[in-house]
Image (cartoon, grey):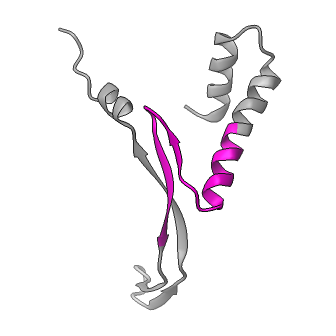
């Protein structure tokens, strides 16, 4: 599912809201998550999961094509850990 499909699905389930309002809500949620992660904070959505930032130190890497040693800068990468409820729902056995 992509963001526009998420917006459309929420708008369909909530006919009293305008499509543009749903889009604004979704964008605000994403902006707040991104802002919190940028500030170094953790974002936890109970039952869904937690977003955090992991920091990777600078290191020496290797160009796989040429084998040349290259310098890789330090960087921050987003990390997502699923919540218990999401994990359980993904691993439910269908009723036979």
Magenta span includes 52: yes
Q: In front: 41, or 95?
A: 41
Query: In the rendered view, does 94 fall on the left or right side of 80?
Result: left
Q: Is residue 68 left or right of residue 77?
A: left
Q: Which residues are magenta?
A: 29-55
Residue that lies at the very extreme toward the left in this rendered image: 96
**Residue 77, horizontal then vertical, whole percent:** 52, 63
As drawn, is 71 to the left or to the right of 87? Answer: right
- In the picture, which quadrant includes the N terminus? top right
Residue 24, magenta (yes or no): no
Location of residue 4 with respect to 73 vertically, above or below: above
Q: In this rendering, is residue 55 above or below 82?
A: below
Where's residue 69, x and y in %?
43, 91
In which quadrant will I find the C terminus? top left
Q: Could you tell me which residue is drawn at 41 percent across and 84 percent down?
A: 62
Count how many numbered circles sit on residues in the image: 0
Which residue is drawn at the image coordinates 43% and 31% (left, top)?
47
Name the spot of residue 36 as percent of width and height, x first: 64, 53
Q: Is residue 23 above or below residue 94?
A: below
61 or 19, nearer to the observer: 19
Q: Position of residue 40 (x, y in %)?
A: 59, 62
- The residue at the point 68 percent across, 38 percent down is 29
Q: Which residue is at 38% across, 31% downward?
A: 86
């Amino acid at each position: 599912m992509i963001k526009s499909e998420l917006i459309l699905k929420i708008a369909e389930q909530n006919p009293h809201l305008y499509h543009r309002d749903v889009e604004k809500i979704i964008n605000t949620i994403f902006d707040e998550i991104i802002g919190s992660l940028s500030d170094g904070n953790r974002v936890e959505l109970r039952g869904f999961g937690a977003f955090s930032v992991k920091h990777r130190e600078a290191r020496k890497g290797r160009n796989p094509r040429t084998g040349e040693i290259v310098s890789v800068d330090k960087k921050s990468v987003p990390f997502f850990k699923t919540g218990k409820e999401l994990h359980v729902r993904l691993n439910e056995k269908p009723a036979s």
